[in-house]
Image: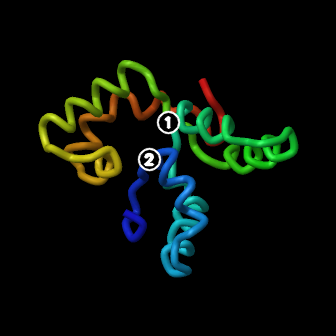
Amino acid sequence: MLLGDGPFIADTSAWWRLSSLPAELAELARQAMGDDRLWITPIVRMEILYSARSTSEYTEVETELDGFRILRNDRAVADAAIGELAEQGAWWETLLGTEPSRKRLAPVMPLLPPRGSID
């Protein structure tokens, strides 16, 4: 995924593992973030912010998370993803990696909020 050019979704555990990646993988992850290919969901954002131990840590983490695209997490997105999983047996992080997947998810893709915003 990190070597590809398609977007992928990071869950909470992936977020916490980013800081302990080997240097080569950490650089690929930073590049994916800079290229707007590493996305999170509102629930992941909430879980990460919930772990803040102080107001200043919350503000610091919130500022960092503001740089990520927030994938809309509603029934239409979930139904499209579940349909893709059922059809291909794929995992979330590969949903957007193939042309058939992009076509299946096309109806909800224009509804993504701008990077760093939550609808």
- Locate residue 103: give its quadrant: top left
Q: Is residue 104 left or right of residue 9?
A: left
- Residue at position x 52%, y 62% from top? 32
Residue drawn at 67 percent across, 35 percent down: 50
- Please tell me which residue lies in front, 85 or 101: 85
Q: Percent x, y for residue 94?
A: 29, 51
| Residue nearest the viewer, comparing 89 with 99 | 89
- Indicate which disc residue 71 carries: 1
In the picture, measured across the screen, residue 2 lies left or right of residue 39, that is left
Number of numbered discs visible in the structure rendering: 2
Q: Residue at x 53, y 66 (%)?
A: 29
Q: Which residue is mark 2?
A: 9
In the picture, measured across the screen, residue 61 lies left or right of residue 18, that is right
Q: Residue furthest left?
A: 87
Whole-number angstrom distance, CA of label 2 to CA of label 1: 8 Å
Q: Secondary structure at mark 1?
A: loop
Q: Amino acid at mark 2?
A: Ile
**Percent from the top left, x then y, of residue 57?**
81, 47
**Do labels 2 and 1 touch, CB within 8 Å?**
yes
Asked which colour scheme the image uses, the reply is rainbow
Quarter of the figure that contains the C terminus: top right
Looking at the rendered structure, the secondary structure element under dot 2 is strand
Three-letter code, disc 1: Leu
